[in-house]
Every structure is written in C-alpha cells, then in structure tokens.
Image: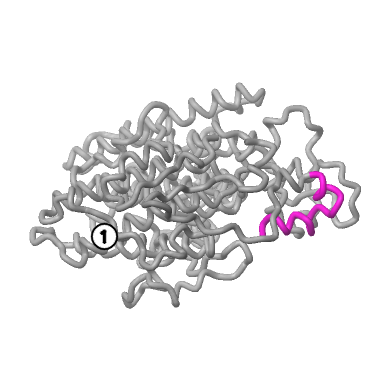
Amino acid sequence: MNILKLVADLAATTPNQFEQPADRRDALTSLGRFGAKTLAAALPLGLGSVPALARDTRTILDSLLLALRLERLQNAFYTQALTAPASFFPADTSIRASIVKMQAHQQQHAALLVRLISTSNGDVPAQPRYDFTGSKNNTQAALFPSVFTNFDDFLTLAQLLEDTSVRAYKAMVEFLVQDNYILQTALQIHSTESRHATRIRMIRRQRGATVKPWPSPADADITVANKTAVVYATEHATTQLLADYTSVPFRLLPIGSGANILTESVPEAFDEPLAADSVEGLLNLFTL
Amino acid sequence: MQRRSFFRAAGATLATSTLVLAGCKDDEEPATPVVNNVIAFNGFDTTTRQPIDDGVLNYAYLLEQLEAAFYQKVVASPPADLLPGELAYLTDLRDHELIHREYLKALLGSKAYDVSLAAPLEFNFSSLTLTTRVGVWTAARQLEDIGVAAYNGAGKLLVVTSNLLALGKLASVEARHAALVHEILQSDSFASTVGADGLDDAKTPTEVIELIKSFLPVEVSVAALPTT
C-alpha cells in the first residue's frame, strides 16, 4: 500500500501543517523509521507554496517507543498491585482474575513492542522506575497516596491509565500508515485496552462510582486539574468534523430523541485521540 | 476534498506527477449500485484502478446499520426478563449505533451505497432469540465482537488518514460495548476475544460478511475491496 498511502496522506495534509518549523530528522536512514508527515516534509519540492518542514514529524519508531512506555508502566502498575495481600482485593474473585488478565496483556504488549522496535533497528530504552502515588518518591504531594492499599484508589488510577492508552493508540495510528502490520497490531492493542478500560469502569460502577462503561459527560470527575485532567480533555466532544471541516449536523439526523442525545450520547459514541505530548505528560506523573 | 487539497499543499508540479497515484477526480463517483440483489462494495477508482476508501467506508456503514437496527428492534420490544439497568444499557447502545450509522452516512455523502434506494435495507434477525435477556445479550455479544474485529481488520485497507482516524473513534467504542456485553453475560469475560500477544481479534471483510450474511436481505460482495 505504502506509496499510495503516502500520497493520500500528503493530500490529506492541510497547508498549515507545513507552516511551523520543527526538528528535522537526520536523514532518511531507514524508511521504516519515518512517518508520512516526515516524508512529506523531506520531499525536495522547491515549491514556493510548501514550507520545508512539517509540524508533526513523529515516526513509526517514536510511536512504538511511546506505546512501550505506556505498556511498561501499566504492566508495572498491575504487577505491583498483584503483589498486594489478598485483603486488598474484593471478595468477588472475578475481579482479581481480571487484573491478572490485564497485567498479562500489558506484559505481552510490551514484549511485542520490544520485538518490533528491535527489528526496526531502534534502541530499546532501559526499563524506567515508577512511583504510582505520584509523589515522585515523596518529593511532592501524592496524587494517589493509597493506590496499593485502597482498592477504589487503585481502580481510579487504573481507569485513568487504560482510558489514556485507548486515546494514545487512537492518535498513534495516523503515524503508522506506512506499515500495515504495525498499523493492524496497534489497532488490535487499541481495542484490547478499550476492553480493559470498560472492565475497570464496570468494577468501579459495581462499587458505587458514578461512571459508565465508556467515557461520558455523566461520569463523576476523577481527575485533578493540571495533573490528570488531560486524560479526558477534549474527550467529550459534541461535534465531529467531516473532510471539508463542516460539522456533522447531528441535531438534524435521525439519531433518536432522548433528552441528552446531543450532549451525552454523541460524546459517548466517539472516543477521541490524545496527542503524544499529552500522553507523555500523564506518564511523567508516575515515572521516576 | 482530501485529494484536491493536495494541489494547494504541494503545488502543481508534484501534483501532476502523482495525479494518477492519488486518483484525483473532479467527478463524483456513482453510488454503489444494488444490482440483482447484490451490493458490491468497490474499493478501487473505476478509471485509475487505484484504491479508494468508499468501499471500506460503505462496509463499515453497513455494519453500523446492522447494529443500529438490532438494538432498535430490541429496545422497541425488550424481553420481559431484563435485569434492572439492562434496558438503559440497551438504549445507550442503540443511541451510539444510530449515531455511528449517521456519522458514516454523513462521511460518505453521495457515496453511500443506499443513497438511491427507495428504502434502507431491512435486516433479518429471525435467526436470533430476542425474547429472553440471555438471547438478546448473546446476540449483542456476537454483533459487537464482529464489529470490533471488522474495524481492526479494516484500518489497513484505508487510503486517507482522516478516514482511519474516523473509524478509530468508533472502533474503541465498539470494543467498550463488546466488553460491557461480555461482562453482562459472564463476569471476567471482557477479553475472551484477546489472543496471542494480547491482541484483540481482527477479521477481513470476507470473513465478516460470512458471519453476518444471515442477517442481510441481499448478497454483499466485498471481492472488490482492497486486501492490503
């Protein structure tokens, strides 16, 4: 597919994406390391209408490395939780069993990503260390002081991390279109993370939290301003754009007549992407 | 629109050399016709033979129509033994699928396969048991898992990145639906479709159509969709 996808991606690149200078990558040492937007920027055009540099030059490798950070962090999070005494977990044994499954998946995702990075001639970073209280080893106020002693606090952070993963992979696929195998793999991880997020949400709901199986404006806010608020920033969008930048006229369409159809059902029906820098910011809260 | 912006972005010289590859066309493609009770989704430009997204988007649109019709039927006549809260879930699922259906229809515009049909397709759910909660949720689980696997398999077939992003917004919501329905039927079964390497299922359009053909009133051919 790949040259066709590149051409199509160029066509889909709006002019303002060419406007802002960004770090230019060294050279085209390895095609697999470059995303479409980088190639768009690197084309020797010499055309007055096209500034030389694209705004977002994330590569396939950049995306795989971000995905690895996400998976390693979640794997460490669940692994640490599973070392807690049995009393940490609810009496319903299906709940701990689900956490075991999630941990296994995150470990498998991390291992798969390491393989993909290695075969793309990328360097696999050292395993980071984490503090899931968010206190950076007691150097600042904790966000989740009881994360491994209070099961509801643990679930709250689990939901934030899983929902962030869904949004991160959704944003990432744009930069993977040059490689069908990696693209499909990312989509298959994406829906696994989504299943995790919903299971966590349903456990929280069973325990009395105001939360739906999908991100909803009706959910009780579990975020902290300037810290974890990024997880649901722009998630509850009430408008969707078409290719010509007009909005889908939901109010005129036969989508039902519930009282909250436009303000609640529409945002629920779409999960929104989250840009890599926002994802990094969230991961940094818990990474030493 | 996507392709025309290429001219503005890259200028005429490069555009000329890639005109064929990009499949630029001024004329609207005709909508996918329904001929002799066969809908054939077309994933290639009829002139240039290069891949286009119309066919894959129509395939996604058909899946959303199917899911929406299913939940509309169930909510209109719910089984008597639903547990508390379950009708609210079914209503949410119906609303989400109606929104997905209309979103894809809006994305497709004149390219929607049924734009010239006198009436939308009527799906046939007679093979399902919709008089019990277990029957309804079992059918919902089947449809939602198919939807997730279909989106996971369709992403790589798309040419235009904005369409990939559009389907991605729906795909994870389908996975959330699927996990909900799994959990309603059996606690801790949210990930029973997840296999080796922690990867959720992915299916080709051919595999998906085979699974849903009993619900379809016409034959659907995906033979003319891209396969890579």
Q: Residue A235 vs residue A207: left or right?
A: right
State the image quarter where residue A37 is shown.
top right
Residue A197 in view of the camera: no
Q: Residue A234 vs residue A8: left or right?
A: left
- Spot occupied by residue A278 in the image (x, y as percentages of width and height): 58, 52
The three-letter amino acid code for the residue at tag 1 is: Tyr
* Foreground pick, A229 / B3: B3
Region in magenta: B1-17
The residue wearing badge 1 is: B71
Main structural element of the magenta stretch: helix, strand or loop? helix
* Foreground pick, B125 / B141: B125
- Spot occupied by residue A154 in the image (x, y as percentages of width and height): 35, 46
Residue drawn at point x = 33 percent, y = 39 percent: B210
- Spot occupied by residue B58 in the image (x, y as percentages of width and height): 47, 53
Looking at the rendered image, the quarter that the N terminus of chain A falls into is: top right
- Decide whether residue A212 is among the magenta residues: no
Residue drawn at point x = 54 percent, y = 39 percent: B226
Residue drawn at point x = 41 percent, y = 60 percent: B100
Chosen colour scheme:
one colour
- Against B92, residue A144 (above or below) is above
